[in-house]
Amino acid sequence: MKKWFFWFTMCLVSILNGAAFFGASISALNRGLNGVDNQAALLFIPFLWIIAVFVLVVLNIYTLIRGINIKKEQIIHLLDVFHLSGLSKRVKISRVGFIIITCFLMLFGYSLFAAERMWSIVYALSGGILLLFLYTWKRAAVQRTNG
C-alpha cells in the first residue's frame, strides 16, 4: 500500500478496535458481571472510554507525524513481518517475539470480553491487526531514517 492509504487504513482499524471496546464494555455494563458482589465497580467503565478515546487520538496523531519521515513513494507491505527468510538471526528472533507477544495480547483481549463473543472476537482481531500495522509503520519510518 502507498504510505497515506496505509496510514488511513491503520486509523480505520484503530477506530474499529475502539468501537469494539466500547461495544463490548457497554454490553458488560448493561449486563453486569456474574459472580461480582460490587456491581458499582462497573461505573469505572465510562472513565475507560475517555482514556481510550484519548489514546486513539494521540496514537493516530503520533503515527501521522511519524509518517512524515516515510518516503512519499514508498510502498508498505503489511504482511512483510511474516517473511523471515534472508534475515539475520537477531531480526528473526525479534519478529517471532513480536508475533508471539501479539498473539498473547489478542488472547488477553478476547478473554476480557469473552461473554460477549462477537465483540471479543472483533476486539482481539482488530487489536492484533492494529499492532501489525503499527509495527510495519514503525519499520517503514526507521528504514527511511537509516537509509
Image: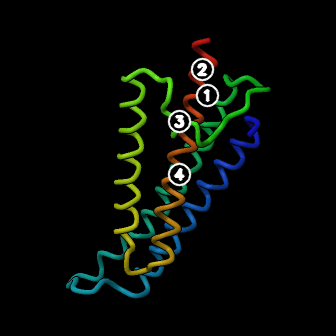
Disc 3 marks which residue? 83
Local secondary structure at mark 3? loop
Quarter of the figure with residue 44: bottom left
The percent coordinates of residue 36 (x first, y second) are 22, 83
First in residue order: circle 1 vs circle 4: 4
Instruction: Look at discs 3 and 4 and give the one toward the viewer.
Output: 3
Quarter of the figure with residue 18: bottom right
Disc 1 marks which residue? 140
Asked if the residues shown at circle 2 and circle 1 are in contact, with their CB atoms under 8 angstroms apart, the answer is: yes
Disc 4 marks which residue? 54
First in residue order: circle 3 vs circle 2: 3
Asked if the residues shown at circle 3 and circle 2 are in contact, with their CB atoms under 8 angstroms apart, the answer is: no
Instruction: Look at discs 1 and 4 and give the one toward the viewer.
Output: 1
First in residue order: circle 3 vs circle 4: 4
* Mark 3 surroundings within 10 Å by alpha-carbon count, few (fewer than 14), some (14 through 19), many (20 or more): few
* Mark 1 surroundings within 10 Å by alpha-carbon count, few (fewer than 14), some (14 through 19), many (20 or more): many
Local secondary structure at mark 1? helix
> What's under tag 2, amino acid-wise?
Gln
- Measured Cα–Cα span from mark 2 to mark 4: 29 Å
> What's under tag 1, amino acid-wise?
Ala
Q: Is residue 141 left or right of residue 106?
A: right
> What's under tag 3, amino acid-wise?
His
The percent coordinates of residue 63 (x first, y second) are 61, 37
> What's under tag 4, amino acid-wise?
Phe
First in residue order: circle 1 vs circle 3: 3
Disc 2 marks which residue? 143
